[in-house]
Image: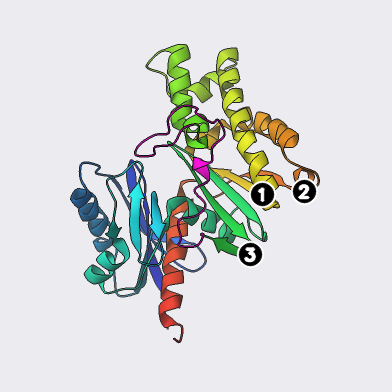
Amino acid sequence: MAEQRVIGVDLGGTKILAGVVDRAGAVGRRRETPTPTGSQSELLEALESAVAELVEDDVAALGFGIPSTIDQRSGRAVSSVNIPLADLDLRAWMGDRFGLPVGLDNDANAATLAEWAHGAGRGTRHMVMLTLGTGVGGGLILDGRPYRGAIGAGAELGHMVIDLDGPPCQGSCTGRGHLESLASGRAATLMAQEAFGPAVDAHRLVRLAREGDANAVEILATLGRRLGAALGSLVNIFNPELIVIGGGFSAAGDFLLDPAREVLEREALHPGREFVRIARAELGTAAGLVGAGLVAFEALDGAAAPA
C-alpha cells in the first residue's frame, strides 16, 4: 500500500505556498502564487485553485496554516489582521469541495509544529517559537504537545503587550504596544525609513548593518531589545527549554538576537534564564508548508480514530 500523502497550504499575506507532504515532512510537488487581498471570495478562489492543481488519488487530507484567529470547535477562521478572511467555516468549506478530511491552524502554530517535529526543536518537550515577518506570530509546545488554548485561539504571542499605550498594532488589531508593532519586519521598515529615507526597507536595513553602518546596527539592536523583553516574559511564564526564532526578519541574526539575549537575561528569573536556549529556525520558508501538512495528518488521523 502506497504511503498516504496530504496537501499542506501555507497562506501568507503576500503568497500562497501549497505542496504535497508525507509523514516524514518531505515536500513533493508544490506551487506558489500571490495572495489576492481584494476580497474574501477572491482569496477563497485562490486557495481552492492551489489545492485543485495538486490533488491526486494518493492525497488523503488537506491542511491549512492561515494568519488568522481560529476557533477549532467549529473550524472557523474568526478574524484576520492582514488578509480578508473572517467568520468563515473554512474547514467545512474546503471539505465540501474536495471530500477530504481538513485540518486548520494558525500559520505560526503550523510552523511551530514543523520546527518541533522536523527542525530546530526536534527532541524537545517545552518549546516556544516566534516568527518574525511582516507581523510576529507564535506557537507553543508544552509537555510534548501543541498548545492551542481553550478553543484554538491561543498562542497569539505577537500580540503580547510590551509597551502600554505604545504604537498602534497593525491591520485590524485594535491594541497598542504589541510585540508585533515593535519588533516585526514592518516595525524595522518604519524605523529604517525614518532614518534613511523611504526607499529603505527591513531587508536593506540588515544589509546596511552587515556593511557596518552604525545607525542600522543600533536600530536592529533596539528591535532586538524589545524582542528580548518579550522573550523574558515567555521564559518566566512557560519555562521552555528552547525558543526558536524564525520568519523572514530573523535573517537579521545576531544583530537582533544578541541584544535580545541580553535583555532576556535581565528580565527572566533564575533558573529559567540559564536553562533556556535560543536557536534560529532550520526549515526556512518551508516551515509553514510542512506544518500545514502535519495539521492535515492530524485531521486524517482524527477522522480514522474510533468514536
Q: Amino acid at mark 2?
A: Phe
Q: Amino acid at mark 3?
A: Gly
Q: Position of residue 26 (x, y in %)?
A: 48, 62
> What numbered label is drawn on residue 275?
2
Q: Amino acid at mark 1?
A: Ile
The Cα atoms of the two marked residues, 3 and 1, are separated by 17 Å
Report which residue position mark 1 lands on: 237
Q: Is residue 198 left or right of residue 223?
A: left
Q: Image point 42% across, 82% down: which residue? A: 304
Picture colour scheme:
rainbow
Whether 219 is drawn above or below 296: the answer is above
Circle 3 packing at 10 Å, graded few (<14), some (14-19), many (20+), is: few
- Viewer-side label of 1, 2: 1
Q: Is residue 150 left or right of residue 30?
A: right
Residue 25 visible in rendering: yes
Q: Nearer the viewer, residue 279 or 66?
A: 66
**Residue at the front extreme?**
165
Query: First in sequence: mark 3 or mark 1?
Result: 3
The Cα atoms of the two marked residues, 1 and 2, are separated by 14 Å
Q: Position of residue 241 (x, y in %)?
A: 71, 52
Q: Position of residue 220 (x, y in %)?
A: 57, 24
Q: Quadrant of the C terminus?
A: bottom left
Q: Position of residue 237 (x, y in %)?
A: 66, 49
Magenta span: 149-176
Circle 1 packing at 10 Å, graded few (<14), some (14-19), many (20+), is: few
For mark 2, give the secondary structure.
Answer: helix
